[in-house]
């Protein structure tokens, strides 16, 4: 085969490879999209913040899945762990809780922190069972779980999202440090 | 392939350099035509890279790659067989559809022979046969009755044809 033809074939093969990786990343992104739709349905309205966070989550899942190199393995655990902080605020409000006072605000914030703690515990447990790449896994899956959980925590504003991040970091960081030690 | 499946782009060039000649040789052995073998090898190569992320790292890479190549070779062979069949069919249609002088003469003779035989039938039978051929309006009778009448008329036509020409 002539050299130029071979180069053209190599370019086409590379394009096929990248397209194949993109297609392999689609299920994760579609699951993230499904969670975004679920959060919008549960909130009965579509806030701009929800759309931004959901868009970031879909792009992150797509990017991690496409890039691979073990970063893609963080998508599914991250989404599953993110379900806790995503659903907890809806469970609390569905149970009849209505925010009126400042004290209640603290309760709602604690709900987000609790969701973050649960997500962090799930991710830490999963990371400990892995033989290598704990930092990478915790970083990627933590990011996915944070964005996923913030789709629910955004119900309580920025403080809810920060509470979720604090909860997640509170439990996953010590695991990471102890593992490295 | 394991590195490619995990998304390591640095493994692409060595994998391409290894797989391209391998697949060309494999397809050349399976397919007698050189152009077909090249086409199948290229298609297989592109498919291998497109599906690299689906590759199960716990299994051998070579059978997986050659399986894809064999499938592509089969596809090329089927396509070639279809191409071979298609012109023959088209050719037959052209011959059948073309009314040459001999065919036209034969058809004219048959029409005359049929008219002669039908001339010897009863008028009711002729009416029934012409109605069945769409040359006259169907009589206002129930469908089952018409079918029975047509059956009888055809029987008489066959008998008359046999009497006149000696063949069915």
Image (cartoon, coloured by chain):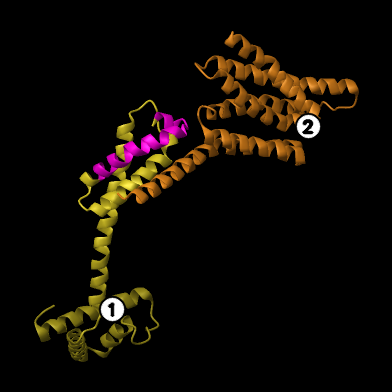
Residue at the image position 65 percent from the left and 19 percent from the top: A120
Specify the subunit that label 2 lies on: A
Q: Which residues are magenta?
A: B2-27
Q: Quadrant of residue A167?
A: top right
Height in image: B122 above or below A40? below
Residue at the image position 40 percent from the left and 37 percent from the top: B13
Residues at marks 2 and 1 on the same chain: no
Please identify which colour was used for chain B in the image. yellow
Q: Secondary structure at mark 1?
A: helix
Q: Which numbered circle lies on residue B150? A: 1
Q: Which numbered circle lies on residue A84? A: none
Specify the subunit that label 1 lies on: B
Height in image: A69 above or below A12? above
Q: Which numbered circle lies on residue A155? A: 2
Q: Position of residue B44 (x, y in %)?
A: 34, 44
Q: Is residue B32 magenta?
A: no
């Amino acid at each position: 085969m002539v050299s130029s033809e071979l180069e053209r074939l190599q370019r086409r093969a590379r394009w096929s490879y990248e397209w194949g990786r993109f297609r392999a990343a689609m299920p994760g992104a579609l699951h993230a999209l499904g969670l975004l739709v679920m959060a919008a349905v549960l909130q009965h309205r579509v806030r701009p913040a929800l759309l931004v966070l959901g868009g970031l989550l879909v792009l992150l899942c797509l990017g991690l899945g496409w890039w691979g190199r073990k970063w893609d393995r963080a998508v599914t655990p991250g989404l599953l762990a993110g379900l806790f902080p995503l659903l907890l605020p809806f469970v609390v409000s569905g149970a009849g809780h209505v925010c009126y006072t400042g004290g209640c605000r603290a309760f709602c914030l604690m709900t987000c922190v609790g969701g973050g703690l649960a997500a962090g515990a799930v991710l830490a447990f999963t990371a400990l069972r892995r033989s290598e790449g704990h930092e990478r896994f915790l970083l990627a899956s933590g990011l996915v779980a944070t964005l996923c959980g913030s789709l629910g925590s955004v119900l309580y504003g920025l403080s809810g999202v920060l509470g979720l991040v604090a909860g997640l970091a509170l439990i996953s960081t010590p695991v990471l440090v102890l593992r490295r030690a | 392939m394991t590195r490619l499946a995990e998304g390591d782009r640095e493994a692409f060039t060595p994998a391409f350099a290894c797989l391209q000649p391998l697949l060309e040789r494999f397809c050349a052995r399976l397919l007698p035509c050189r152009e077909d073998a090249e086409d199948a090898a290229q298609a297989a190569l592109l498919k291998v890279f497109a599906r690299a992320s689906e590759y199960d790292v716990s299994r051998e890479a070579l059978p997986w790659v050659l399986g894809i190549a064999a499938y592509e070779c089969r596809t090329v062979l089927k396509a070639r067989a279809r191409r071979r069949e298609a012109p023959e069919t088209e050719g037959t249609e052209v011959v059948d559809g073309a009314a040459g002088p001999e065919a036209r003469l034969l058809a004219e003779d048959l029409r005359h022979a049929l008219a002669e035989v039908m001339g010897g039938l009863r008028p009711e039978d002729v009416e029934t046969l012409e109605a069945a051929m769409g040359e006259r309006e169907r009589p206002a009778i129930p469908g089952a009755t018409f079918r029975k009448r047509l059956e009888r008329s055809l029987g008489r036509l066959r008998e008359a044809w046999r009497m006149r020409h000696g063949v069915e």
